[in-house]
Image (tube, helix red, strand yellow):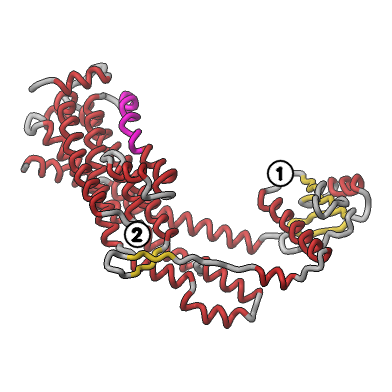
Amino acid sequence: MNKIWLIIQREFMNRVMKKSFLIATIVVPLIFPAIIGLLVYIEKQSEKNSKKEIIHYVDESGTFTPDTAKFLFKNFSGSLDDAKKAYDASDDFGLLYVPKYELSKPAGITLYTKVNPSLEDVSGLERIFESQIKERKMVKLNIDQKILDSLKTDVSVSTVNLTDDGKEKSSNTGLLSGIGMAGGILMYMFIFIYGAQIMQGIIEEKTSKVVEVIVSSVRPFQLMMGKIIGLASVGLLQFLIWMILMSTLTFGVLGYFGIDPPQKQAMEQMQKSNPEAKEQLQKAAGNSATVKTINEVVNMPWGYILSVFLFYFLGGYLIYAALFAAVGSAVDSPAEAQQFMFPITIPLLISYMGLFMFILRDHDSTISIWLSIIPFTSPIAMMGRIGFGVPMWQLALSMILLVGGFVLTTWVAARIYRVGILMSGTKVNYKVLAKWFMQKG
């Protein structure tokens, strides 16, 4: 045990003291806030310097009313052919042709441009026509807009969990889905990244013959376990630093640019468009969606979620790190490792795709439960379910099987590792790996 601890210390210090670790740990958290800040700055500058595009239009229907919110419209009184010639000689954005059409089936409206218009531009024009045709239909049917507005009713369904002791607890499905998605994605990234680092490190030591010196003092199993646990501690340290820096810097960047939450922006927009709604919004502020969401975020069992995340991160990492270590010991280069990596990563890919296809859609379905219990898929799948509340027996069974899966994969990997780590220049295939596994000694 003492030798494993020495190897853990060696792996931890060697990686933490490298410039690459320090750069990655500090620079990566700076990248995301920097990207957000750059995009926000570019958007603000674009809005400040943007000019409305000019669109010439020929209106044969006599009903088109230009809406200058997004475009500047110039009426052309001649024929469509003359309008095309005039537009071709200009540098303006487009030419809009509005033929005579039936209200029940408007057709033939065409936008001519010299370059392909964006989806937003086309959608903007479509909304203008849809709004104007709707108004004409209402006039034709003698329907007042106020009557239509009074028919609109916004319905918000609140979700409340009833506990076994009869207590009520509010919940937010969108928030829980976001937690599950973020947890699953992070789990997939970290298991894959740090597992691959184990394999790469073993290949480098094997090809440099350093490992032959090391195994003269320690057993191959001790060397493998020391490397796996040492790199796991590096990963946890890096993860915690990233989370703290990224959250702090991101909120700082958004605050610097004065960006309000979307709910607050919507409320301000409503106040501008309907001054009478200001008093109603102020009265409803205590019950607003923003306040409810904040309360739900604060009341989430973050300690429980974080502790489960750390357990499954360690368990999932240890399982796949053992397999990656076995592959690294068997090959002499990363190129040779590709044929063995794909079968190992299949369960990871299954659980990652299942996160979006099954788990977040129905966290209590049969396939979601099985994915969260099977050791090779449970780290990602369980993080997708944990926010919604997982029965304790399922969580306990999943954890026990995850520990058992680690023991099994470590035993299998160790039998391959003890032979493969000292082999060089051998053409390795699955038959050779099976032979190494069955070899006594």
- Residue span colored magenta: 334-348
Q: In which quarter of the image is residue 103?
A: bottom right
Indicate which disc residue 278 carries: none
Q: Can residue 91 be seen in this view?
A: no
- What amino acid does circle 2 point to? Leu
Residue 266 lies, in percent from the top left, at 57, 69
Q: Quadrant of the C terminus?
A: top left
Three-letter amino acid code of the residue under disc 1: Asn
Q: Mark 2 points at which residue?
A: 245
Q: Is residue 341 magenta?
A: yes
Q: Earlier in the sequence, mark 1 or mark 2?
A: 1
Q: What element carries label 2?
A: helix
Residue 393 versus residue 150 in the image, above or below? above
208 left or right of 196 in image: left
> Pointer 1: what residue?
116
Q: Distance between the residues labelled 1 and 2?
A: 42 Å
The x, y position of residue 352, in whole percent, is 38, 42
